[in-house]
Image (tube, rainbow, N blue to C red):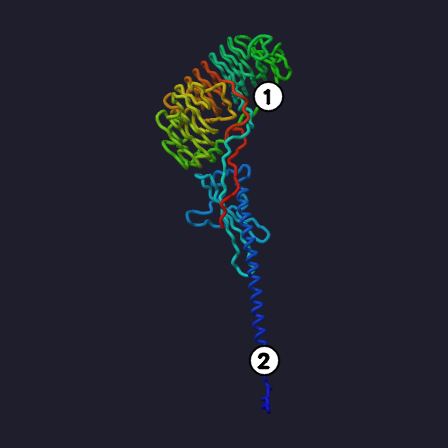
Amino acid sequence: MRFPRLKNEQGMVLPIALGILAVLTISTIVVIDSSSSNARSSTRSKGDKLAFALAEAGINNAVAVLSKNGNDNMHQTLLPACKTGSTWTAESTWKLNDGAATPVKYEGGDSRWCGTFDAANAVWNVTARGIVRNPYGTRQIRRELSAVVPIVPIEVQPLVNQSWNYMFATRTGTASGCDLTFSNNATIGTNVYAMGNLCLDNNVTITAPKAIVLGKIQIGNNGAIGQSGTNNWSTRVEVQVGGAGGQFCKYATGSWTTISSSPFCGDPQHVYSKNSTSSAMTVNPTPTSLVPPNADWNGWYQQAIPGPKQACTFSSGTVPVFDGNTVRDNSISTVFDLTPTSSSYSCRVGPSNNPLGEVTWNHSTKVLTVHGTIFIDGSVKMVNTGVIEYSGYATFYVSGTFLMDNGAKLCAQKNAGGTDCDFTGWDPNTEMMSLVANGDGSIAGAQSQAGSTGDGGGNSILLNNNARWQGAMMATKALQLSNNSKIDGPTIGSTVVVDNNVVPDAFPTITQVPAGMPGNNTVFAQTQSPRLFSG
């Protein structure tokens, strides 16, 4: 069988070549596009991971700012708020490097962060952004993270300034003046330190372990420092006196002794001393030098919680008014009763189980609960006749005068019968309230800040008429204890007057004090690890 001749195939090569070329071109385009897409995807993925890492770095940087020593992490001023209402603040305003206004530069991108303080819950809500340049376009690669950073208040700290272990008068006075005065049958059980002159009136006795006087000592009839006798080492007092105008000690109507007197200060002057440096019954003429604390009034006006810049986040009853305007000027004209007889109140900042600051009074149980550093730009009084017990560590700053009267008793620890403070069992290292007052007994130079009773004029602090105080006190001006009052704890004042059967009681050596106490390091709150990440 014969097959037909095939037709002429000339002209087929070109179409086939073109077809193959088209296929190859399409394949090449697909490969290039796929490669470019993969490269872009890879770059985007790498940039996204880098942006996430930078956002994490931003969270850590914000925590570092909150944790830095000296930074007040209990106020919104430390980091700018991320939101104002429902609108994001301009990213350029975010705080980036503990105060810098420009982003922190890292290899491959920037890290930015901000935070909003939630005082009611004692947390910082922190947001951070990682920003990476996109090589394939103008739009940046960004990742955003948020976290919650809890803070825990520091309520107690080690004592730095040893003045808080004395009844301390800071005024240097004049050659003939008295800067620390004990009058009328007072018995002084606490250590004494006078930067100026010490005066003991008739029938006053110092039984404390130590009396340090940078000026001179004057003792009235039947007064004494320590007890007489040659075999009473345990009842003698370690006395240090520097002398003022070349005069050292004087008893009753006798003459002032000088450094050349024999003795220059001792038993003939009713100064029954023991010298710890020489184990002899002599007075040390080189007194220990202590620097009295300086209250940071402006700082704590800004930083106290609760106070003028931070109101209660929870309140009930009639809480204190912390400020009358926006200036520290003793502007509150009404004296606040810290422990009213027939009503209770509560002011708290932060959660109830661990508040940043609190002052709560329960008139039924007669318990005052205190936490943190509190500032009232006015005067405070206590005239409740009950025996009141306080709980917690706290420092009160009062721009005006503090008055205790009418038999008011404030105890860190009550005695077994609940009728008074426990003056033998209280340890100030386990619980203490301190009060710092700046007034002079007047409002605008006229009205009494201590209420209708008055405070005798010129006093920052007055305890009167059987008052009891168990804690620490500091008066910028005069501090006066009168009329059968009793105090257990350190007291510091420009001048200190103790008269009419007052007993400043002995107390254990203080090694730790409430945060905010003058003369010690300023501490705020501990920053905990961030949690509840989202992004």
Judged left or right of residue 411, residue 18 is right
Q: How many marks?
A: 2
- The residue singled out by tag 2 in the image is 16
Q: Residue at horizontal 46%, vertical 15%?
A: 502
Q: Position of residue 74 (x, y in %)?
A: 48, 38
In the rendered image, the vertical position of residue 499 relative to residue 98, given as above or below = above
Q: Is residue 494 visible?
A: no
Q: In the image, which is nearer the foreground, mark 2 or mark 1? A: 2
Out of 38 and 499, give the one closest to the viewer: 38
Hey, what amino acid is under mark 2? Ile
Q: Which mark is residue 288?
A: 1
Within 10 Å of disc 2 (Cα), the crowding (few <14, some 14-19, many 20+) is few
Q: Which mark is residue 112?
A: none
- Alpha-carbon distance for marks 2 and 1? 110 Å
Q: Residue at horizontal 44%, vertical 26%?
A: 390
Out of 121 and 119, give the one closest to the viewer: 121
Q: Position of residue 339 (x, y in %)?
A: 39, 26
Hey, what amino acid is under mark 1? Thr
What element does badge 2 sit on? helix
State which quadrant residue 407 falls in.
Answer: top left
